[in-house]
Amino acid sequence: MKKYTVVVLLLVLVMVAGCTSTQKGAGIGTLIGAGAGAIIGHQSGHAAEGALIGGAAGAGGGALIGNAMDSKFCPVCGKQFGSDVQYCPADGTELKVIQK
């Protein structure tokens, strides 16, 4: 139990320290997915396998949600882009973060 507490604390520390929303979303999704997968897997005697599968699925979903949180738009043409795009491919204008 002590080993898991240390791992969780390290993951939380990494998420708080200067990560992008996509990385934070993936980290949180991994924790939630792994926990849910372990609980479901435990019922059939495969907690470790359930945690791995749940963590992988949670990471993917969390990354997608985190990326959507940092959407950007072009103030000139109005098109929206993900957080990984810095300049509008159509007109070269620097993109602005959508305020929520």
Image (tube, helix red, strand yellow):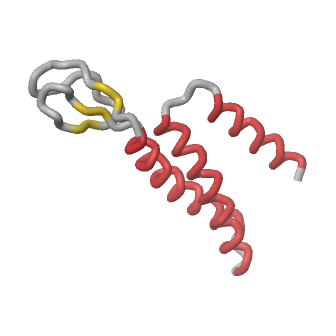
Task: Give the left or right position of residue 4, taking residue 34 as reference.
Answer: right
Q: Please state, as top left, top right, bottom left or bottom right, where the C terminus lies in the image.
A: top left
Give 69 or 4, whichever is nearer the viewer: 69
Give 7 or 71, whichever is nearer the viewer: 71
> For the point 58% across and 24% down, which residue is it?
18
Q: Position of residue 82 (x, y in %)?
A: 31, 37
Q: Quadrant of residue 51?
A: bottom right
Q: Is residue 80 above or below residue 5?
A: above
Q: Give the total number of marks visible in the rendering.
A: 0
Q: Position of residue 23 (x, y in %)?
A: 51, 37
Q: Position of residue 33 (x, y in %)?
A: 60, 59
> For the point 17% across and 34% down, which residue is it?
78
> For the point 52% across and 50% down, which residue is it?
59
Give 8 or 67, whichever is nearer the viewer: 67
> For the point 82% across and 41% down, which residue is it?
6
Give 98 or 36, whichever is nearer the viewer: 98
Q: Is residue 63 above or below residue 10?
A: below
Q: Is residue 49 above or below residue 98?
A: below
Find the residue positioned furthest to the front: 100
Find the residue positioned furthest to the bottom: 44
Q: Position of residue 27 (x, y in %)?
A: 58, 44
Q: Quadrant of residue 86?
A: top left
Task: Give the left or right position of residue 95, taking residue 41 as reference.
Answer: left
Task: Give the left or right position of residue 97, taking residue 53 as reference.
Answer: left
